[in-house]
Amino acid sequence: MKIRIESLKDGANRWTETIEPLELDLDISTYSQPVNLELEADKRSGKIPVSVHVSTQGKYICDRCGEEFKREIGGDCRIIFIQRDNTFPGEVEGDDLRSFLSGQPELDITFDVRDALLLSVPLKLVCTDDCRGLCAGCGVNLNSEACRCEKQADL
């Protein structure tokens, strides 16, 4: 995902884009839907703050029941680009404050957009808040079947 500096007018610029998951090097078995971006760049003399909201739908496996489900995910990132004669030593993709050189044609925010999206995925993925999971004894999905354990049958 690259922003062409010359296409930005001075002051606030807002726009939306839709890109394919492969442009962010996302696994298409998990992220098969287009990725939606809401961008804002404020072009000023020597400085361009960029804010991005990214969202898409992912296909996951529930950590409780093991069933596949789909969920909308979204995240935000903000990067401030400052015009300099040279980049800072040790400056890398993903830094919140980065340099751009005079005459540089574009700002690459691919890494930032991808990270914002992937960091928005919950650590514990569950299909629903009330997912009952699997029985530890017989292994049935308690969302769709009754437990088959003998001790349950005696109750």
Image (spheres, grey):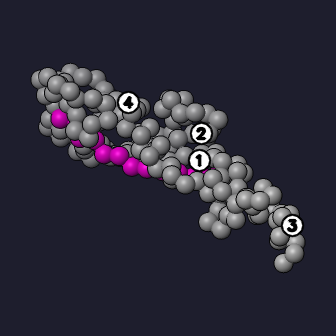
Q: Residues within 10 Å of mark 4 (few under 14, many from 20)?
A: few
Mark in front: 4 vs 2: 2
**Labels 2 and 3 touching (C-beta < 8 A):** no
The kind of residue on which mark 2 rests is: Tyr
Q: Residue at x 66, y 48 (%)?
A: 61
Q: Is residue 5 left or right of residue 23?
A: left
Mark 4–mark 2 distance (CA, rounded to whole Å): 20 Å
Q: Residue at x 60, y 45 (%)?
A: 58
Of 43 and 2, the residue lying toward us? 2
Q: Amino acid at mark 1?
A: Gln
Residue receiving disc 2: 31
Give the Cα distance between marks 3 and 4.
Answer: 60 Å
Name the residue rendered at 70%, 51% in the picture: 66
Q: Identify the residue position indicated by label 1 in the image.
A: 57
Q: Secondary structure at mark 1?
A: strand
Residue 97 is situated, as x and y percent measured from the top left of the image, at 22, 38
Q: Is residue 2 above or below residue 80?
A: above
10 Å crowding of disc 2: few (<14), some (14-19), many (20+)? some
> What's the magenta region?
70-82
Q: What secondary structure predominates along the stretch shown in magenta?
A: strand
Per the model, the C-alpha gap separating discs 1 and 3 is 41 Å
Left or right: residue 24 versus residue 77 is right
Residue 48 visible? The answer is: no
Which secondary structure lies at badge 2?
Answer: loop
Query: What residue is shown with label 3?
Result: 150
Q: Is residue 65 magenta?
A: no
Q: Say whether marks 3 and 4 touch (CB < 8 Å).
A: no
Which residue is identified by label 4? 2
Q: In the image, what residue type sits under mark 3?
A: Glu
Quadrant where the C terminus is found in the figure: bottom right
Identify which amino acid the numbered label 4 is placed on.
Lys
